[in-house]
C-alpha cells in the first residue's frame, strides 16, 4: 500500500527512514523499521512525560543520524568529490518558523544545529558558518565518512560512467510529531542522493522538503530536484490549510506525483489524522499514537 491514512486526534509520532533505502533487501528493510520503531517508542514515552516536542523531534533525528544504516549524519552518502555534505531542517508549526543547515560536512548532528538556528537571526546556514557556529555553541563536529561509503565512492571512480549518479540513494530521514497540546513539528536530515556534483544542495533544508504549521506537518524524502520542483511539503500544507481534508490532499498530491513519474514519498499529519504516500517501492516508516504502533511499512510480496 503506497498510501495510508488514519484518524488520530491526540498524540502522533511519525518517522521515516527514506524513500530508497541503502539496503533494500527484506533484512535491510526489517532492520530499518525496527530502528524506527524503537526511536518512535522512546519519542512517544518522552512526549507522554511532557517533554518539549521540538526536543523530542530533534532527539529522534539525532538517533537516526547516529545510525549508519540511514543516509543522514554519520554514514551519509558522499558527493562525487568524496565529501559528505549534509542538510537538515526543523519547522516549528506553532510559530511557523523554519530553520536548517545546508551542505555541512563536519557536524555530528545537523539536526541539533537546525534546532539552535530556530532562535537565531540567520535561520538557514551553510559552511563556513555551520561548523563555526557549532564550535561556538559546543555542538560536536566530526567526519561523517564511514568505511563503507568510502569504498563505494572509490569504486565509483573506476566506473566508466564516473561521475555516476546513485539515483536510488536518497534515504533522507524524517519525523513529524503532534503532541497532546496539538503542537506540530516536522524535521528532516539527509546526506543527499550520493555521488552528486560537489556542492549540490538537496530539498531537505527547504520548505519543499519539510514544512509545519498549526494546520499540518510534512517531511518528504526521495529525489530532491523533483521534490523542489513540486514544492511537495508546502503544497500539501497549503491544501490542508485551505480546507481540503488530509486524505484528499494526500491523494491528490500522490496522484500528481505518479502522473509526473516522480520518485519520492512523505509522512504527513494534520489536527485530526495522519497520512503516508510514496511512489518509490520502499519507504520504511512507523506511525505511533499514545498507546503504540498504529502503522508501519511492510514489504509487499512480488506476484
Ligand atoms: N531528498 C534528499 C536529496 O535529494 O538530497
Image (tube, helix red, strand yellow):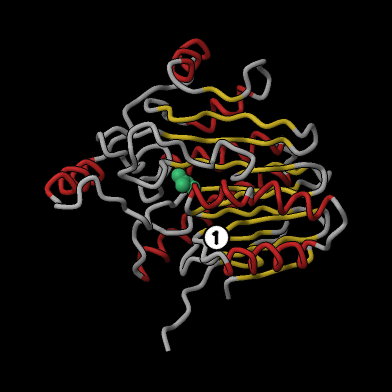
User: Between residues 157 and 24, which one lies in front from this camera angle?
Assistant: 157
Residue that mark 1 sits on: 285
Q: Residues within 10 Å of mark 1 (few under 14, many from 20)?
A: many
187 shown above or below 100: below
The C terminus - image quarter: bottom left
User: Between residues 154 and 58, which one lies in front from this camera angle?
Assistant: 154
- The secondary structure type at the circle numbered 1 is strand
User: In the image, what residue occupies the spot 66% across and 59% down?
Assistant: 288
User: In the image, what residue occupies the spot 76% across and 46% down?
Assistant: 179
Q: Quadrant of residue 256?
A: bottom right
- Residue, far top: 136
- Pinpoint residue 83: horizontal percent, then vertical percent: 29, 32
User: In the image, what residue occupies the spot 61% across and 41% down?
Assistant: 187
- Residue, far right: 243
Q: What is the tally of numbered marks visible in this picture? A: 1
The N terminus - image quarter: bottom right
219 shown above or below 84: below
- Pinpoint residue 103: horizontal percent, then vertical percent: 43, 30
Q: Quadrant of residue 99?
A: top right
Using residue 62 as the reference point, say whether residue 231 is left or right of it: right
- Residue, far bottom: 303
Using residue 66 as the reference point, say whether residue 262 is left or right of it: right
137 shown above or below 48: above
Q: Quadrant of residue 132?
A: top left
Amino acid at each position: 500500500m503506497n498510501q495510508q491514512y488514519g484518524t488520530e486526534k491526540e498524540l502522533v509520532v511519525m518517522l521515516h527512514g527514506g524513500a530508497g533505502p541503502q539496503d533494500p533487501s527484506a533484512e535491510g528493510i526489517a532492520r530499518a523499521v525496527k530502528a524506527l520503531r524503537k526511536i518512535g517508542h522512546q519519542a512517544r514515552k518522552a512526549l507522554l512525560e511532557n517533554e518539549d516536542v521540538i526536543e523530542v523531534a530533534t532527539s529522534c533525528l539525532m538517533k537516526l543520524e547516529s545510525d549508519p544504516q540511514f543516509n543522514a549524519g554519520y554514514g551519509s552518502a558522499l558527493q562525487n568529490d568524496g565529501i559528505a555534505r549534509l542538510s537538515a531542517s526543523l519547522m516549528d508549526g506553532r510559530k511557523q518558523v523554519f530553520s536548517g543547515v545546508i551542505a555541512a560536512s563536519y557536524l555530528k548532528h545537523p539536526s541539533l544545529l537546525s534546532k539552535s538556528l530556530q532562535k537565531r537571526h540567520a535561520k538557514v546556514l551553510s559552511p563556513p558558518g555551520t561548523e563555526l557556529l557549532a564550535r561556538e555553541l559546543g555542538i560536536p563536529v566530526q567526519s561523517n565518512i564511514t568505511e563503507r561509503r568510502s569504498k563505494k565512492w572509490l569504486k565509483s571512480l573506476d566506473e566508466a560512467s564516473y561521475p555516476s549518479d546513485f539515483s536510488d540513494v536518497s534515504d533522507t530521514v524524517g519525523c513529524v510529531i503532534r503532541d497532546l497540546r496539538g503542537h506540530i513539528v516536522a524535521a528532516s536530515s539527509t546526506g543527499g542522493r550520493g555521488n552528486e556534483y560537489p556542492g549540490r544542495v538537496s530539498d531537505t533544508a527547504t520548505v519543499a522538503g519539510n514544512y509545519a504549521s498549526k494546520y499540518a506537518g510534512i517531511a518528504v524524502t526521495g529525489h530532491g530536484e523533483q521534490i523542489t520542483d513540486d514544492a511537495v511539503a508546502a503544497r500539501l500544507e497549503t491544501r490542508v490549510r485551505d480546507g481540503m481534508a488530509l486524505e484528499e490532499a494526500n491523494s491528490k498530491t500522490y496522484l500528481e506525483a505518479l502522473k509526473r513519474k516522480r520518485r519520492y514519498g512523505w509522512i504527513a499529519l494534520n489536527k485530526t489524522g495522519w497520512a503516508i504516500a510514496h511512489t518509490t517501492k520502499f519507504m520504511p516508516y512507523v506511525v505511533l499514537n499514545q498507546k503504540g504502533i498504529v502503522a508501519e511499512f511492510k514489504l509487499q510480496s512480488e506476484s
